[in-house]
Image (spheres, helix red, strand yellow):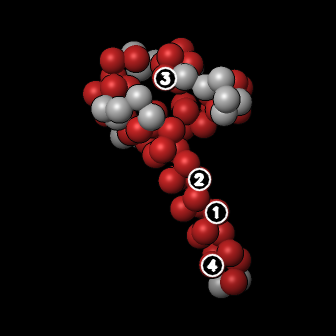
């Protein structure tokens, strides 16, 4: 099972795909998750923190891809 922050990031990604970046809210993330809005705020204190963490995660994945492809 994923740790809570990873679960929130996965759900945030799903919500981003569903709602788009302009309309995405913490409430949308909570609605797509089994976690409450309060749980999201427990793990990510600021309102924007889950979004920033999601973008950081996506950036890390994108930057790691070329390095992984070069090793093949």
Can residue 1 be seen from the camera position used here? no
Crowd around label 2: few <14 · some 14–19 · many ≥20 (10 Å)? some
Q: Which residue is mark 4?
A: 67
Quarter that holds the N terminus: top left
The image's mark for residue 62 is 1
- Measured as percent of width and height from the top left, residue 60 is found at 54, 62
Q: Earlier in the sequence, mark 3 or mark 4?
A: 3
Closest to the observer, 32 or 51: 51
- The local secondary structure at tag 3 comes to helix
Select label 1 or label 3 by which is in front. 3
Do residues under tags 3 and 4 come within 8 Å of each other at their CB atoms? Answer: no
Do residues under tags 1 and 3 come within 8 Å of each other at their CB atoms? Answer: no
Left or right? Give the position of 39 relative to 30.
Answer: left
Q: Earlier in the sequence, mark 2 or mark 4?
A: 2
Q: Is residue 10 above or below residue 28?
A: below
Residue at position x 61%, y 68% in the image: 63
Crowd around label 1: few <14 · some 14–19 · many ≥20 (10 Å)? few
- The local secondary structure at tag 1 comes to helix
Q: Is residue 49 above or below residue 61?
A: above
Quarter where residue 17 is shown: top right
């Amino acid at each position: 099972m994923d740790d809570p922050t990873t679960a929130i990031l996965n759900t945030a990604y799903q919500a981003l795909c569903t709602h788009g970046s302009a309309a995405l809210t913490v409430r949308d993330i909570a609605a797509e998750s089994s976690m409450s809005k309060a749980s999201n705020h427990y793990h990510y204190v600021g309102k924007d923190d889950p979004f920033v963490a999601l973008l950081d995660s996506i950036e890390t994945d994108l930057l790691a891809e070329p390095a992984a492809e070069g090793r093949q």
